[in-house]
Amino acid sequence: MTTEQITISADVAAPAATAWQAYTAPEHIVQWNFASPDWQCPWARNDMTVGGTYAARMEAKDGSFGFEFTAVYDAIDPGRSFTYTMEDGRKVTTTFTPDGDVTRVTTTFDAESENPVEMQREGWQAILNNFRAHAESL
């Protein structure tokens, strides 16, 4: 069985180094890692080494639902890209492509089978849009 892949992207008005830092540093991740204003990311940890773990808590602000997102890094090209595998075995690759003062951040991930592909794309894109707003505010 071949897993469908979904690709999302955002052009961030920030240098690649700023975008990378905002995307990978836990103190920044908690500022943007949620899909809507009624959600939050109370904590994040990121051991950005091959074999290291990325983990973040995402939860509704009213406490009605939450979960921990955990993945292990497979490959890292500092400042340019990384790939990790989520707990369910799906892969995610994120790249940072500079173009002057703009950085294109692109994420390609294996779709899961429980939710429609478009719903997954919209949710991940909403999180990436929050990231863009945060990175551009720095």
Image (cartoon, grey):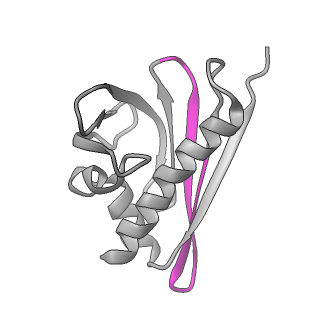
Residue 61: x percent and y percent? 24, 40
Which quadrant would the N terminus be assigned to in this image?
Answer: top right
Q: Quadrant of the C terminus?
A: bottom left
Q: Position of residue 86 (x, y in %)?
A: 47, 26
Residue at left offset 23%, top offset 35%: 62
Query: Of residues 79 and 135, which is closer to you in this image?
Result: 135
Up the image or down, 28 lies above or below 112; here it is below
* Magenta region includes residue 123: no
What secondary structure prevails in the magenta region?
strand
Q: Residue 9 or 62: which is nearer the viewer?
A: 62
* 96 drawn magenta: yes
The part of the chain drawn in magenta is: 88-107
Does residue 41 appear left or right of residue 82 in this picture? Answer: left
Q: Residue furthest bottom?
A: 100
Instruction: Give me the residue at 49% from left, 60% from top.
Output: 129
| Quarter where residue 97 is shown | bottom right
Which residue sits furthest right? 1
Q: Quadrant of residue 14?
A: bottom left
Tell me the residue at 38%/46% (across/down). Answer: 34
- Above or below, comparing residue 129 to residue 38 in the picture: below
The percent position of residue 21, horizontal first and vertical second, equals 33, 63
Q: Quadrant of residue 23?
A: bottom left
